[in-house]
Amino acid sequence: MDMKETLKLSIEDILNLKEMQNTVVLSGFDQLDKKVNKINIIVDPDIKIWINSEDFLLSTSFFYKAMSIDEQINFIKLLIKENVSCLGVKFSPHFEQLEQKVLEFAEKEKFVIMKIDYNVSFTNIIASIYDALFVRQMDVINKITKVHDEAMDLLLEGGNIFDIINTLENETKSRVFVVDNYYDKYYHSNRKDSEVFIKSANTFSHNNRLGEISKGVLKTVSIGSTIYNRYVFPLRVKNEIYGYIISFIEDAYYINMSIQLIESVATVISLYFFNQLSLEEVEISYRSEFLENLFSEDQNRINKAIDRSIFFNMSKEGSYQVAQFIFDKDINENQQIFKHLHRIKSYISNFEQANVLAVVNNRINLLYKFDKHTQGNLIDKFSNKGNFEQNYQVVFGRKVNQLSDVNRSYQDCKKIANNPGILLDNYIVNYENLGVYRLLINEHISDEIVDFYNMNLKDLVDYDEKRGTNLVETLEAYFISNGNLRKMSEILFTHYNTILYRMERIETITNKKIDNEDDRFNLHTSLKILKLLSQHKDA
């Protein structure tokens, strides 16, 4: 009969049973806290085949009568090697004791040997041990059920995560921290030393950011001058690992019971987060539907959104602007979407102007009532590249003067997002500051734009690719330096005469005169088109 760690009896527990009251410990006096996993009776010299780790072996003195002292010692060595917990011997009147040399060896090796009352049957001993196990099992099950029910009652009565953590800490005699991966938050009781434990929890979270654990992990950690047993158990919500319970158990005696209590209450904590997440999803869905209708080209849907705008503290008249967040990687996973939304929401929570933050077509969009001060605050907030764990950009559409025109601002954001050449390394891109790019990203004239590029610059680009020259780079330097050839020489680290030669070659290949205003405009515009086309090609 296997016993779970929490249900195992120690040797001392067994000695306290009524049937064992006349038992005498002969060796291993300081090892009585060892756990017993099975009960076995020695009936055959080939016992090695049947013994297991943490066995409590019962035998009679007859088994040893025919053994020499060396054979008895070798037998004890075998039991130690197999990690047997203890050996109980029932001595007969004809063989009352093991040799002192054998007992001294057992004591030296910290192995427990006990003398069992000759008048007590093995059947009664085994029955009493199993009775004790049954009582312990019921006690453990009752305690786990009690703690689980208390946590569930707290949840049903409107309690919060902190109430559940306090209950768990009191029952497990440990410090408990709940990690919320969606919102990068820690929940814990209000104790002065919490920061010390959070540092260890942070170390775990950082090391497992990419490789999530799928089952409980127990590890010894040092916090200050104290050694703790840190147990981490994953919280699953909607088939995803939402976060972890991290507990720090100082007293090893409570480890096994604490683990079972934590795993039991984990279902309640997961349910708490499930409820929170469901409410958040409903709210996000409501906001998303509002923006989707407002961004639509269907006037009926736009009118429907305007009718509901009052619920978002917005009115039909007024200036509005859309900002869109573009991340290096798609945010199709709920966990990433919720995490980014929550972080953006925290940044704009103190803004006075009405705003709606939601997901439309897998991109996070912010519609806000425009004023220069609010726009400046947004730019300041999101110019910091450390706001998120991955690279991102924020693009602003045009400012519109009534809510029914917000679709135009949204379309501006889409055009910018679909033309990565405009973004490059800029964290903030404002449609109203794009200049000629506002025309170049217009999808309705994309064919004309490509034709314009082909007529003016394509021959020069092809020449560079075939000959390995840098004439396009030279032309870019020309416009950067406003036609100052000496400055061009410095930018390109190239001799002045070489610059002159290259400019002549550019004029010949493109059939354009650099001192002609129209030709200069066409070449400069074509370079901007090239920037867009190159990024599309690489995407």
Image: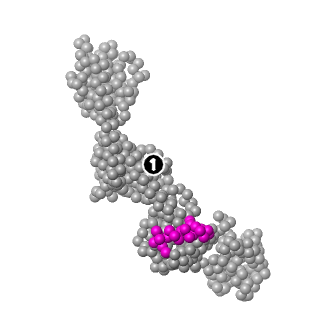
- Residue 227 visible at all: no
The magenta stretch spans residue 49: no
Residue placed most toward the observer, 192 or 264: 264
Q: Position of residue 480 (x, y in %)?
A: 63, 81
Where does the image place residue 113, in percent across and percent down from the top left? 28, 25
Q: Is residue 296 magenta?
A: yes
In the rendered image of this protein, does residue 347 appear above or below residue 127? below
Relative to residue 485, is residue 90 depicted above or below? above
Q: Which residues are magenta?
A: 292-315
Front residue of this view, candidates 327 and 531: 327
Which residue is disc 1 drawn over? 236
Q: Residue at x 55, y 68 (%)?
A: 304
The C terminus: image quadrant? bottom right
Most common SS among magenta residues: helix
**How many discs appear?**
1
Quarter holding the N terminus is top left
Reply above or below: 115 against 413.
above
Query: Foreground: 348 or 118?
Result: 348
Q: Residues within 10 Å of mark 1 (few under 14, many from 20)?
A: some
